[in-house]
Amino acid sequence: MTESSLKVILCNGAELPETSTQTDFVIKLEYREGFPNRNINIQLPKFVRDVMRLPPRILDLLEIAGYIFAADRLVSRGSRDTLEYHNWARRIHFIVKVRDFDFWNDPRTGKKLADTLLFMTGDKEYNFSFQRGHSTNPMGLFDNSTFNLPRESSVSVILFSGGLDSLAGATELLENSNNIICLVSHRSGQPGTSKTQNNLYRSLRAVFHSRVRHYRFRCSLVSEFYRAVEETQRTRSFLYTSIAYAICNALNQSKFYIHENGVTSINFPRRQDAMNARTSRTTHPKTVAMFQDFFSLMQGSKIEIRTPFLFKTKVDVLKIFNKYNRQKLIPSAVSCSKTFLNIKQATHCGNCFQCIDRRLASFAAGLNEIDDVGIYNHDFIKDRNEAEAKTTLIDYIRQAMNFSQSSEDSFYHSYLNELIDIAEPISYLYPRIDEQTAISRLWQLCNRHGRAINKSLKRIQKLYAEPYEKITKDSLLDILAEQSYFEEPVNRLIESICEQLRRSIPELFKHNQPKNEEDFNDKVNALIMAQGPDYEREHPGIRFAMATAIPDHSFVAHDLVIEAKYIRGDTTPSKVSEGIAADITKYGSRDYQILFVVYDPGRAISNDDRFCRDFSSIGNYTVKIFR
């Protein structure tokens, strides 16, 4: 079974149609108490006295959202190091028993739901089939908590993850209004996340008292049945927004809030591997617009989702705590995407993109001493970073540098494809902002972010650089000193490959020289492929191939081609030059780089620099000589 084969998820006792031939991968999911095959938890605190205030359609929604989230964690996207991006695009078919069959079976409903999930997750295919006959005890969906929804009309419902952005959003709403704030959280079963959310809730309640309410939606796998195989959790925001919409419905509210800074929400790709499912779109403007459209269809009238931080950077968000003198809340918020890796008292891994983004923003905002109080497992500033973290750092800095140096026109041309999916949804969410104004404001946002990161890096160098202390290799300080973010990713890969060959070739041929050029090519190929996983981690998205295989049409999609040349016996440097020239002609004017690995044990080439320079000066060609 391939990663892209169809996965069928049967929910609420739904049955596989007799006509179905898709039986190679079937999962049955059940949350209802008392069923012997119950294998996931879906529990919502009893936030209404009379559960019948939630219509059957919304009860169906909460179940469907829970099943989607559970399936998301059970169906692998494939290895993070895979070079075949389509492995990350899954095909999933849900078959669900529902109460409001007529609504869910309407083709418009299934299409809007599938289209939303497809864009948000980057997956290849979502299908939904619905069956009649589902019912539950009126209290079956809820646990035994005794929460009551506030009856007051001045209520704001917001998504609350426990991260800095949602905490800042709650703080700002509480400071600027007299509304009751309903915090909506998801509990996945991880005790650290629940503890973070509960502690922040108690901190806010200590100041704002009964104006703060916390509603926790629990959805998790039952561990004795399943263990998660996929932790990207791209469907989690659909789960969050579904429960927020349900609370709004019960409160007769027509809007709720998502607080996420615009740089994170839009998540412009930092390199080519950050495409398709590898680029998170959980709060992307188009995702939010599609959520709004879907919930409005459910409601039969307009539901509004507000995103107050869309044009704010992470630094802008941090400054909100300064504005209201709530800086002490900062260390308690958790931004890390890999909390399961944290040890001791640390709440952040210190390596992931979210940790890097948060720490650099804290330096730019002048809040680094408040933020850095032992909450990070790893100090990426002074300590050595492994390949993936180093790449994340370099790509992050490179993008920020490009943002800071861009003009509005160059920004538009660089991100034209992405802006098509952003400008129109922003105009839909903000009718007063036309598409051209949206693009202009996005450029201002990214430019401001780039300049803030520049400020942050200057502060870090000033605070940490010591003239009499050696800089740790692959630390942030080392990256800044080497300025490796100026290098194109493919050039960084070439340097890594050449360094590996420089170490290995002398040892490999110490006693026995290659039989011929084909033998040398095969051995170089073996050396590179032996290091493949490391190259993929350090240079994700870069593809390379050896010329022993005849190039086919897919070859033009590679970023790097490697050709090996062996100078032996009566082979002259001029013959090698002719061979290189012939290869250049063979490949034509493509966008990828060509690395020529020349093995010259007899030192037939008298002037290495000139030999290499003659080719590098005419195009994307790199010649390296090894002995």
Image: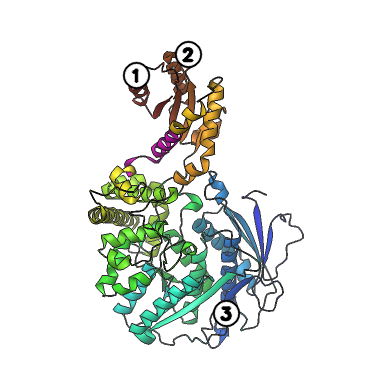
Expressed as whole percent of the image width and height from the top left, the position of residue 109 reads 57, 65
The residue carrying mark 2 is 571
**Residue 414 vertical placement versus 112 (above, below):** above
Residues in magenta? 485-500
Three-letter residue code for mark 1? Asn
Q: Secondary structure at mark 2?
A: loop
Q: Which mark is residue 607?
A: 1
Of residue 268 and residue 613, the one placed in the foreground of this image is 613
Q: Main secondary structure of the magenta part?
A: helix
Q: Secondary structure at mark 3?
A: loop
The residue carrying mark 3 is 55
* Residue 228 visible (yes or no): yes
Q: Report the residue that reaches farthest toward the front.
A: 511
Q: Viewed as shown, does residue 231 lie left or right of 584?
A: right
Three-letter residue code for mark 3? Pro
Of residue 262 and residue 163, the one placed in the foreground of this image is 163
